[in-house]
Image (cartoon, helix red, strand yellow):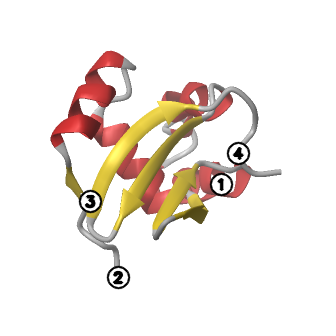
Amino acid sequence: MQTCYRMTKHAHERSTARSIPPGIAQMILDYGISREAGDGARKFALSGESLSALRRDFGRDFPKVVESYRRRGAYVVVVADKIITVAFADRPIFN
C-alpha cells in the first residue's frame, strides 16, 4: 500500500524553484528507494531498479521521461505523511 503524502508549502516552493514537478516527486516516492535522513525523516531517490519497475508498469519509453531527474540526483525528503522538500543532490545519494 502506498502512503499518501501531503506537500508542505516549503516543498511546493522548492519544487517550483528547482523545476521538479510534483508528479515527479510522487513518482520518486512510489518507485524510489529510501534511507533514513535523521530526525525521523526519510530520503527517497530513484535507482536503476526503480527505472526497471517503471518500464514494467508503464512501458519501455516512459522511464526516459524521469531518467534525467535520476541522473541529476533528484530526491524527496518526507517526515511522517508530509513531503518537506525536494532537491537535486550534489553527489550520489545511494551507491
Q: Which residue is mark 2?
A: 1
Quarter holding the N terminus is bottom left
Image location of residue 32, percent across then percent down: 55, 57
Q: Amino acid at mark 1?
A: Ser
- SS state under label 3: strand
Q: Earlier in the sequence, mark 1 or mark 3?
A: 1
Query: Closer to the N terminus: mark 2 or mark 4?
Result: 2
Separation (CA) of disc 1 from disc 3: 27 Å
Q: Secondary structure at mark 2?
A: loop
Measure the alpha-carbon separation of dots 1 and 2.
20 Å
Above or below, comparing residue 72 to residue 60 in the picture:
above
Marks 2 and 4, how far apart at CA: 25 Å
- Which numbered tag is attached to residue 93? 4
Q: Name the amino acid, label 3.
A: Lys
Judge left or right: residue 72 versus residue 75: right
Crowding near pointer 3: few (<14 within 10 Å), some, many (20+)?
some
Q: Tell me the number on the disc at residue 82.
A: 3
Find numbered disc 4 in the image and state the secondary structure of the residue it sits on: loop
Q: Measuring 53% from the left and 55% from the top, which residue is drawn there? A: 44
